[in-house]
C-alpha cells in the first residue's frame, strides 16, 4: 500500500541573480555588503526541487511536503510572499544566517536536526530534496552531509528526473559529457539533489498561497534561532575579480569579412 | 607538510580520465616529487589503472577493487573513500571533481569526521597547512581559505589544473577491503546519439546560443529550423560544445517554438554550468547572466549581436560583431567545410 512520501525540501534564499554583489569583512567573517537589503529569491535549484516535490506529491495524493529553510526570519517572510503560491508545503523555518560564507557542514548539522525533529515526519518514507548546489556557496555538499547525519545511504545528485513505479524510484542523474546515469532505488529513504529537472516554474495560484500562509506565519513565529559557527574555517581574502575587457566593436562590415575573421580565430591555437 | 592522499576512481572502461590526472597534478603541488603522498584508486580495473600513475613518485599506493565498487553509487563510493582515507591516515585528501566524486566526497567527509571543499581552483602549501581558492556566488567572487579540521577533503574543479603527464611504472599496491552495500542498482547510461552530441567538455570552442535565434527576423518570420541547422553544422564542423542561455532552454518547457538541439544540460549561467573552454562565441545573446557567470572561465570571447550597445558585450567580450548571426554563421560554416 502506497502511503505516499514525506518530502523534506531543503532550500533558502539567495540574492537575486541580477544584483551586483560586493563582499565585505564582517565580525563573523566575510559577508555581502547590504546583505539584508538585497532582493532575494528562493535558491534556483532548491526551487526546482520544490516544484518536483509538488509534482510527485500530486501524483499519489498522499504525500506531504515540508520546506526546511534557514535564514533571517524577516527575510524568510518576504520570500514566502513570492513562493507560497507556487506549491503546497508546510514551512519549517530556522532563524539564522543564509549567506554563502557559512560552512556547509554547519548548515547540514542544523538541517539534519531540524528535519529529524519534524513531529509527523516518518523517516522510512523520507525523501530529502534540495538543490544540487546553492547559488551562494555553490559547494554541492550540504545535502549529502545532511543525509549522512540522518543515516540515509541512498543519495543522488544532479537529478533531472525521478519517476516511481511500484514503489521503486527510477532516477536520472547528470554525468559528464551531457549523459545521464540511470539508477533504480528500492524506495525511500533517499536524498535527491536536483539540477533543473524537467518542469517549468508553476504559475502563481492564489488559493495555494492562502492555504500555505495559514501555516507559514505560525511557522515563522516558531522559528528557532540557530547559529552557524565554524571557527576552524578561516577566510584570508574574498574579492571580486575585475575582468572588464576592452571590447572591439566591429560594425558596418561585410558578412564575408566577419566570417573570414572568425574562421581564422577559430583555427588559431589558443 | 602533512600526509596527502590522492584518490581517484576508474571509469567504466577501467581508465583514469583527464580530471583524475588534473587532480594528481594538484596533489603533487602539495607533495612535490611524491614525498608524503599516498595514491589510491578504486573501481573496475583499479589495480591496473594504478600502474599508470606509478611514475608520480608517491610513497604509498592503495587499491580497492571489489565488484560492488564498479558502479557509480553513493553508498558504495562513500564506503570506499572512507575506507581509503582511514587506511591512509592522511590529513588532506585530494580528488577530481567528477560527477561521481561530487556526489560522494561530502558524505565521505562527514563519515570521516572531516570537512570538505569542492570546486577548488587553486591550492598552495602553507607553513601551517594548506590554502585553497574557490569561487562563491556562482563565480562572482573568489575566496582564499584555510581549515584547521582534518581530514580535509578537497575536490578540484575541472580544467583548473594541468593534467599529470608522467609515465607508468609498476607499483606495489596495498589492497584495502571495503564493506559496501547499496539499495541502488545502476541501470545504465543514456548517451546522446553520436550525431546529436552537443556537449564536448574537451572542445576548444564553446558556442553559446541565446533566445534571439527563435525570435522574428528581418522578414517578420521566425526561422527555428534554419537556426537549428546552422547551429548543428557549426558544432559538427568546429567540433564545438554547445551552451545556451536559460531563456532559450526554458522555451521548450513553455511550449514555444524551440530548437530541439537544446536541453537543460546545455544551459550555462546562474542555474547552469560554468564550463572551461579556451574560446567562446556567443550568438543572439542579450542577457547579462550567461556572460558574467557562464563565461567566467572562457579565455577568449567573441560575440555576434545586432545591438552594438548590448550591455553585457561591452567590457565582457573581446570582440563584438554587429551583424546578423544567421548570415555570419552560414558563411562560417561554408568556410569550415572541408574542400
Image (tube, rainbow, N blue to C red):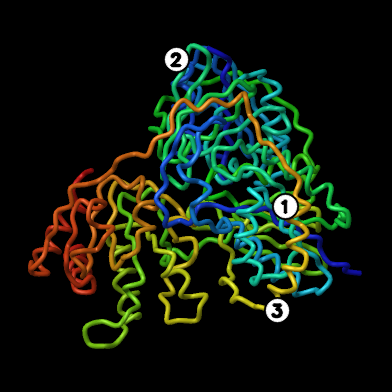
Q: What chain letter is assigned to the residue under label 2?
A: B
Q: What chain letter is assigned to the residue under label 1?
A: A
Question: Residue at point 50% right, 22% down?
Answer: B54
Gap between marks 3 and 2, in whole Å? 65 Å
Gap between marks 2 and 1, in whole Å? 50 Å
Q: Which mark is residue A207?
A: 3
Badge 3 crowding class, 10 Å Cα cut-off, few under 14, some 14 to 19, many 20 or more, is: few
Gap between marks 1 and 3, in whole Å? 22 Å
Task: Report whether residue B338 is seen.
Answer: no
Residue bearing mark 2:
B33
Residue A184 location, quadrant: bottom right
Same-chain check, marks 1 and 3 = yes
- Give the side of residue B19 with respect to residue B78, left or right: left
- Tag 1 secondary structure: strand
Question: Residue at point 35% right, 80% down?
Answer: B224
- Tag 3 secondary structure: helix
Badge 1 crowding class, 10 Å Cα cut-off, few under 14, some 14 to 19, many 20 or more, is: many
Question: Where's residue B253, x and y in %?
Answer: 52, 75
Nearest to viewer (mark 3 / mark 2): 3
Location of residue A74 with respect to B46 vertically, above or below: below
Question: Where's residue A81, x and y in %?
Answer: 62, 66
Asked whether A70 or A197 is in front, the reply is A70
Residue reaching furthest bottom?
Answer: B220
Residue bearing mark 1:
A93
Nearer the N terminus, badge 1 or badge 3? 1
Amino acid at each position: 500500500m502506497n502511503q505516499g512520501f514525506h518530502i523534506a525540501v531543503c532550500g533558502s534564499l539567495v540574492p537575486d541573480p541580477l544584483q551586483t554583489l560586493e563582499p565585505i569583512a564582517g565580525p563573523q567573517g566575510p559577508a555581502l555588503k547590504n546583505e539584508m537589503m538585497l532582493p532575494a529569491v528562493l535558491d534556483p535549484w532548491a526551487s526546482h526541487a520544490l516544484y518536483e516535490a509538488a509534482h510527485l506529491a500530486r501524483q499519489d495524493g498522499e504525500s506531504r511536503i515540508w520546506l526546511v529553510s534557514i535564514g533571517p526570519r524577516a527575510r524568510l517572510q518576504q520570500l514566502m510572499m513570492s513562493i507560497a503560491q507556487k506549491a503546497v508545503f508546510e514551512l519549517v523555518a530556522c532563524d539564522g544566517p543564509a549567506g554563502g560564507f557559512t560552512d556547509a557542514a554547519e548548515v547540514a548539522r542544523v538541517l539534519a536536526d531540524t528535519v529529524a525533529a519534524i513531529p509527523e515526519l516518518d523517516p522510512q518514507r523520507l525523501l530529502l530534496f534540495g538543490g544540487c548546489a546553492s547559488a551562494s556557496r555553490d559547494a554541492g555538499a550540504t545535502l549529502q552531509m545532511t543525509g549522512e547525519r540522518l543515516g540515509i545511504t541512498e543519495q543522488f545528485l544532479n537529478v533531472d528526473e525521478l519517476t516511481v513505479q511500484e514503489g521503486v524510484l527510477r532516477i536520472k542523474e547528470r554525468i559528464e559529457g551531457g549523459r545521464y546515469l540511470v539508477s533504480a532505488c528500492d524506495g525511500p529513504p533517499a536524498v535527491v539533489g536536483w539540477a533543473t529537472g524537467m518542469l517549468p516554474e508553476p504559475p502563481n495560484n492564489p488559493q495555494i498561497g492562502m492555504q500555505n500562509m495559514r501555516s507559514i506565519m505560525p511557522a515563522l513565529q516558531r522559528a528557532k534561532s540557530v547559529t552557524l559557527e565554524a571557527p576552524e574555517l578561516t577566510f584570508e581574502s574574498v574579492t571580486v575579480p575585475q575582468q572588464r575587457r576592452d571590447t572591439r566593436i566591429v560594425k558596418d562590415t561585410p558578412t564575408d569579412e566577419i566570417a573570414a575573421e572568425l574562421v581564422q580565430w577559430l583555427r588559431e591555437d589558443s | 607538510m602533512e600526509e596527502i592522499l590522492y584518490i581517484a576512481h576508474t571509469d567504466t572502461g577501467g581508465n583514469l580520465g583527464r580530471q583524475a590526472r588534473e587532480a594528481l597534478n594538484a596533489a603533487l603541488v602539495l607533495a612535490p616529487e611524491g614525498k608524503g603522498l599516498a595514491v589510491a584508486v578504486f573501481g573496475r580495473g583499479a589495480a591496473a589503472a594504478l600502474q599508470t600513475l606509478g611514475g608520480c613518485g608517491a610513497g604509498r599506493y592503495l587499491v580497492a577493487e571489489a565488484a560492488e565498487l564498479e558502479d557509480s553509487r553513493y553508498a558504495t563510493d562513500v564506503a570506499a573513500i572512507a575506507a581509503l582515507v582511514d587506511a591512509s591516515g592522511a590529513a588532506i585528501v585530494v580528488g577530481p571533481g567528477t560527477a561521481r566524486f561530487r556526489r560522494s566526497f561530502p558524505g565521505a567527509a562527514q563519515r570521516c569526521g572531516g570537512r570538505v571543499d569542492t570546486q577548488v581552483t587553486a591550492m598552495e602549501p602553507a607553513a601551517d597547512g594548506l590554502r585553497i581558492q574557490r569561487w562563491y556566488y556562482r563565480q562572482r567572487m573568489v575566496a582564499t581559505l584555510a581549515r584547521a579540521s582534518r581530514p580535509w577533503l578537497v575536490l578540484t574543479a575541472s580544467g583548473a589544473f594541468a593534467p599529470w603527464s608522467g609515465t607508468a611504472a609498476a607499483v606495489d599496491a596495498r589492497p584495502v577491503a571495503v564493506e559496501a552495500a547499496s539499495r541502488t542498482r545502476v541501470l545504465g547510461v543514456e548517451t546522446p546519439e553520436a550525431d546529436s552530441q552537443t556537449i564536448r567538455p574537451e572542445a576548444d570552442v564553446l558556442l553559446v546560443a541565446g533566445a534571439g535565434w527563435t525570435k522574428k527576423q528581418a522578414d517578420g518570420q521566425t526561422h527555428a529550423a534554419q537556426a537549428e541547422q546552422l547551429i548543428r553544422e557549426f558544432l559538427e564542423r568546429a567540433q564545438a560544445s554547445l551552451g545556451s542561455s536559460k531563456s532559450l532552454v526554458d522555451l521548450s518547457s513553455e511550449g514555444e517554438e524551440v530548437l530541439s538541439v537544446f536541453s537543460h544540460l546545455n544551459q550555462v549561467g546562474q542555474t547552469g554550468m560554468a564550463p572551461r573552454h579556451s574560446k567562446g562565441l556567443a550568438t543572439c545573446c542579450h542577457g547579462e547572466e550567461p556572460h558574467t557567470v557562464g563565461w567566467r572561465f572562457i579565455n577568449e570571447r567573441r560575440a555576434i549581436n545586432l545591438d552594438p550597445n548590448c550591455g553585457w558585450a561591452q567590457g565582457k567580450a573581446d570582440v563584438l560583431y554587429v551583424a546578423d548571426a544567421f548570415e555570419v554563421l552560414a558563411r562560417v560554416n561554408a568556410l569550415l567545410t572541408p574542400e
